Image (cartoon, grey):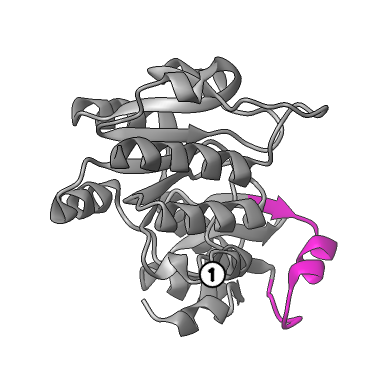
Amino acid sequence: MGEEKVMQSLTIEGRNAVIEAFRSGKPVDKVFILDGCQDGPVRTVVREAKKHDTIINFVSKERLDQISETGKHQGVIAYAAAYEYSEVEDMLALAKERGEDPFILLLDNIEDPHNLGAIIRTANLAGAHGVIIPKRRAVGLTATVAKTSAGALNYTPVAKVTNLAKTMEELKEKGLWFVCADMGGESMYRLNLKGPIGLVIGNEGEGVSRLVKEKCDFVASIPMKGEIDSLNASVAAGVLAYEIVRQRLG
């Protein structure tokens, strides 16, 4: 993947253009459709979106006009990813190729594109084999994410999955175990973080969701000495990722 892909336009406008984007296999994250519009081409857009499990938002004309870049949206606007998504299998293959235990970051509903970009950058520098994000209630691979990753998206696979907890179950069958970041956990310095591992980071407000936390083998807390009680999600990811790196080097 080339660096020039970072700045490509991510907004696709017009019924035929959006239909063509789906049929050509472009990774479309989200579609905005004029509420109440039900003609043939719009029904085709809806059908393609459902087929590809793309999120559909029915919105007002004012909202479409607001997000339109051309003013010629014809009642349909799609957001496409800046980069191709990878498969989880690609990450396991990369670990095998490098002769390393798999090390994967899983992000539970990270909604801030700057946080996602920063985490992908950290994942790359820490030697992680990939990043997994959920399809819903989370930011996708936007231009802001690509820019904040400082080029890491060219090298670090990112997969988008329908169900994070189910993906964790499948990875457990392949030998991975999981640690999530949470204030109520045991100090990360007391945990053995070696071997095939998945590091789970929760979102900026609520942290790791209950269903995902239940799938984790360990809950790790980062020792904090200050007056405030939490770290930014990307900083927490960096601190824990590098504790994993330290233990792997030890």
The image position of residue 95, as x and y in percent, is 21, 49
Nearest to the observer: residue 220 or residue 73: 220
Q: Quadrant of residue 12?
A: bottom right
In this rendering, is residue 207 above or below 27?
A: above
The boundaries of the magenta stretch are: 57-74
The image position of residue 79, as x and y in percent, is 58, 65
Element carrying mark 1: loop
Q: Quadrant of residue 242?
A: top left
Type of residue at label 1? Ala
Is residue 148 one of those drawn in magenta? no
Nearest to the observer: residue 33 or residue 247: 247
Q: Decide: few, some or many residues near mark 1? Use Cα within 10 Å; few <14, some 14-19, many ≥20.
A: some
Residue 106: in sight, yes or no?
no
The image position of residue 49, as x and y in percent, is 48, 55
Is residue 65 one of those drawn in magenta? yes
| Left or right: 169 as drawn, with respect to 27 | left
- Residue under numbered circle 1: 150
Residue 47: in sight, yes or no?
yes
Q: Residue at x 45, y 41 (%)?
A: 241
Q: Residue at x 27, y 50 (%)?
A: 91
For the C terminus, the image quarter is top left
Q: Which residue is drawn at 35% across and 53% down?
A: 127
The image position of residue 162, as x and y in percent, is 42, 39
Nearest to the observer: residue 61 or residue 168: 168
